[in-house]
Every structure is written in structure tokens, then in C-alpha cells.
């Protein structure tokens, strides 16, 4: 399938109403499927990426398009026999262009770069969708993004404000990513022998380290960032969100000693070990998993908001511990 690149008037290209996310939306909502409803189905302005988990959120995509004065990757369009132009891939980008154009945002948003195919059959359209959204180029992992941001800022001397514009995020997040990468490279990498697998997936622990409370607690307890890196490597802090708990753990000599010897989970349990009755302990894994699923389905928004605002919430900590345990356990069934 070979298409031609063209600039198409945004008002002449139809949003793809066969998009799986739009069809899912139609199952729950009634009424005319206008552009505003399509935008809602695409979660434009929400924190869900066009390409799924790990992709850029629509808000960040909007900001990046503004900073770059356009898109770098053309949308994909099918020209039907009756002349209609139907978008196959790039619904969110097309909607953003149309919104900018209608809102009078500074710049030329009246036309959009597109790869145009003539008269594609249904199976060919499906093939493009699958390649773009399921088996296409993967989003960079967090460590690789931070490494690239650090290089642009420090090696290529790109001003931070420009970098923030291009990334589409906010200044604090970009600065935190850069600082986390620097701390990781300065204190973590030297713990690895030549040829040893460098655990870049532990990067999120260094993001959590950027909290002033965490760094202060480490230094106040007589440790340094080399010690922190060693804790991450030997998995004394296994669930990386538990880095947030270091101020609690390191503030008390007893729990501090437990942490150094046995890890952060043991130290946190020493602070406040939850009571578990005999019925729960005797339940099977299947029973516990079923009840947990039911409990999670019943969680209210107020509870989620409370847990988001409290980094010391024990419920959240145990959930992440369970997530780690489940991921490790289920990995044996994916081989």
C-alpha cells in the first residue's frame, strides 16, 4: 500500500467513525454522533493517549503541536470512490487541527499533512490501524525519554523553556525527569560491572527521589545518594513508590535499622502492621483475588482522591506491593 503525501483542508477530512474507541463510546451514549461527541469519545483533553498506554496524552499533544507549529507525522487518509476523504489514523491530531482552526489559534491550521491512499479495501484499512496502534512503533520508556531530555538540555544547550514546549508537559515535570536521570547516572551506574545488565527500569525510583522531603530524610539520617542507589539496586526498596516512605522509615532508629537489614516493607510493617484475621489468612489465592476485584470495582472517587493526596496512605502501599507480587507470579504463566 503506497500513498501520496498531500496537504488536505481539515474541514474536508472526515473523522473516522469506525475507530474502535468511538464505537465503544456509541455503546454507552445516545444521540447524533457529531464532532463534539467524537472528541469526547477520543478523550481529547483528558490524560489518555491516542495510541494507548504510554503514549502522549491529548493535552501534551496539543501543546507540542502548538510549539512545533504543526505535526511531524502525517495522518493517514483513505479517498473513497465518491471522493470522500476518511481518516484512518490520526483522529486526535485531526480534531486538534480543526479545533485550532475554528478557535482562531495563531498559525495556519486550515490544512493538515496527510498520506492519502485511494480506494483502500476494508482489510487494508484494518491492517493500517493494527500497525499504527497495536504493533507499530513503541513509545520510549521513561528512562530513554529522560536521557534524551538531559542530552538536549546539557549537551545541545537547548533552553529549558523550549524543551518544555517541545515535550508538551510542564516545567516541573521536565526538570524532575532531567534531574532524576542525572542522579541515576551519577550514583547508580557505577554500581554495575562491565557487561552487567543496567536496570533502567529502576529509573522511577530516582524520579521519586526528587522530592525534597526524601533527599532531606536521607541526608539527615547520615546516608547519601550512593547509599540510596545501592538500596535501589539490591531491592531493599522493591516497590519504587515506597521511596516516598523513606522520611517515615529513616526518622526512627529502630525502623531505620530494620530497613537497612531487611528492606522497606519490613520497616513499614514495624511502624504499623495491619491486623489480618484468621479467615483472611485461610482464604485461597483465588478467593482473595476475587474479593479484591470486587472491592476495587466499588472504590469511590473520594477514596481515590484521598489516596492521591496522601503519599503515606497504607492502602495504596499495599496495593502496589500486591501489584509487584502479582506481576512476578503471573510472569511464569506468560512463557
Image (cartoon, rainbow, N blue to C red):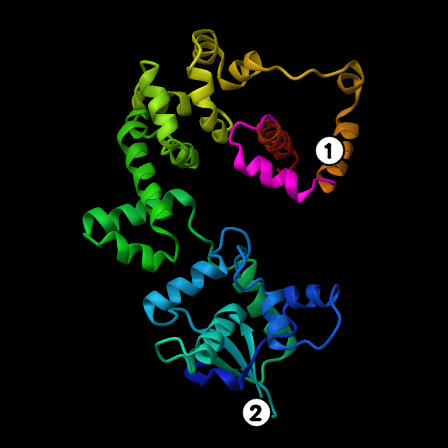
In the rendered image, which quarter contains the C terminus? Answer: top right
Nearer the observer, 326 or 59: 59
In this rendering, the answer to whether 15 lies above or below 21 is below
Q: How many marks?
A: 2
Closer to the camera: disc 1 or disc 2? 1
Region of the chain picked out in magenta, as a range: 298-314
| Residue 6 percent coordinates (x, y) | 41, 83
State the SS at label 1.
helix
Q: Residue 64, image x and y in percent?
A: 38, 63
Relative to 233, is 251 above or below?
above
Residue at 69% x, 15% y is 275
Q: Is residue 301 magenta?
A: yes
Residue under the image location 27 percent in, 46 percent down: 150
Q: CA distance from mark 1 to mark 2?
A: 53 Å
Of 62 and 304, the residue lying toward us: 304
Mark 1 = which residue? Answer: 292
Q: Is residue 181 above or below residue 275?
A: below
Residue carrying label 2: 83
Task: Please report the residue visible at 30 percent of the width from the left and 49 percent of the height from the top.
Answer: 149
Amino acid at each position: 500500500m503506497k500513498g501520496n503525501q498531500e496537504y488536505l483542508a481539515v474541514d474536508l477530512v472526515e473523522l473516522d467513525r469506525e475507530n474502535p474507541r468511538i464505537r465503544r463510546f456509541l455503546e454507552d451514549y445516545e444521540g447524533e454522533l457529531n464532532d463534539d461527541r467524537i472528541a469526547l469519545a477520543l478523550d481529547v483533553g483528558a490524560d489518555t493517549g491516542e495510541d494507548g498506554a504510554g503514549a502522549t496524552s491529548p493535552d501534551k499533544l496539543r501543546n507540542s503541536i502548538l510549539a512545533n507549529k504543526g505535526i511531524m507525522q502525517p495522518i493517514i487518509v483513505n479517498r473513497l470512490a465518491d471522493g470522500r476523504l476518511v481518516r484512518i489514523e490520526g483522529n486526535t491530531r485531526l480534531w486538534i487541527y480543526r479545533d485550532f482552526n475554528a478557535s482562531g489559534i495563531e498559525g495556519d491550521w486550515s490544512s493538515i499533512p496527510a498520506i492519502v491512499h485511494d480506494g483502500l479495501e476494508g482489510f487494508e484499512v484494518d491492517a493500517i490501524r493494527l500497525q499504527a496502534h497495536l504493533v507499530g512503533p513503541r513509545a520510549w520508556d521513561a528512562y530513554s525519554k529522560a536521557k534524551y531530555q538531559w542530552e538536549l538540555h546539557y549537551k545541545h544547550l537547548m533552553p529549558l523553556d523550549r524543551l518544555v514546549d517541545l515535550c508538551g508537559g510542564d516545567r516541573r515535570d521536565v526538570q524532575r525527569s532531567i534531574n532524576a536521570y542525572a542522579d541515576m547516572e551519577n550514583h547508580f551506574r557505577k554500581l554495575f560491572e562491565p557487561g552487567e545488565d543496567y536496570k533502567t527500569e529502576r529509573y522511577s525510583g530516582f524520579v521519586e527521589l526528587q522530592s525534597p522531603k526524601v533527599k532531606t530524610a536521607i541526608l539527615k539520617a547520615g546516608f547519601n545518594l550512593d547509599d540510596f542507589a545501592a538500596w535501589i539496586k539490591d531491592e531493599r526498596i522493591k516497590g519504587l513508590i515506597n521511596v516516598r516512605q523513606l522520611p517515615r522509615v529513616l526518622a526512627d532508629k529502630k525502623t531505620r535499622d530494620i530497613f537497612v537489614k531487611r528492606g522497606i516493607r519490613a520497616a513499614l510493617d514495624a511502624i504499623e502492621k495491619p491486623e489480618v484475621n484468621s479467615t483472611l489468612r485461610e482464604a485461597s489465592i483465588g478467593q482473595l483475588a476475587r474479593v479484591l476485584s470486587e472491592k476495587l470495582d466499588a472504590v469511590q472517587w473520594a477514596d481515590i482522591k484521598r489516596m492521591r493526596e496522601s503519599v503515606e496512605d497504607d492502602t495504596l502501599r499495599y496495593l502496589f506491593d500486591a501489584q509487584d507480587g502479582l506481576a512476578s507470579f503471573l510472569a511464569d504463566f506468560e512463557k
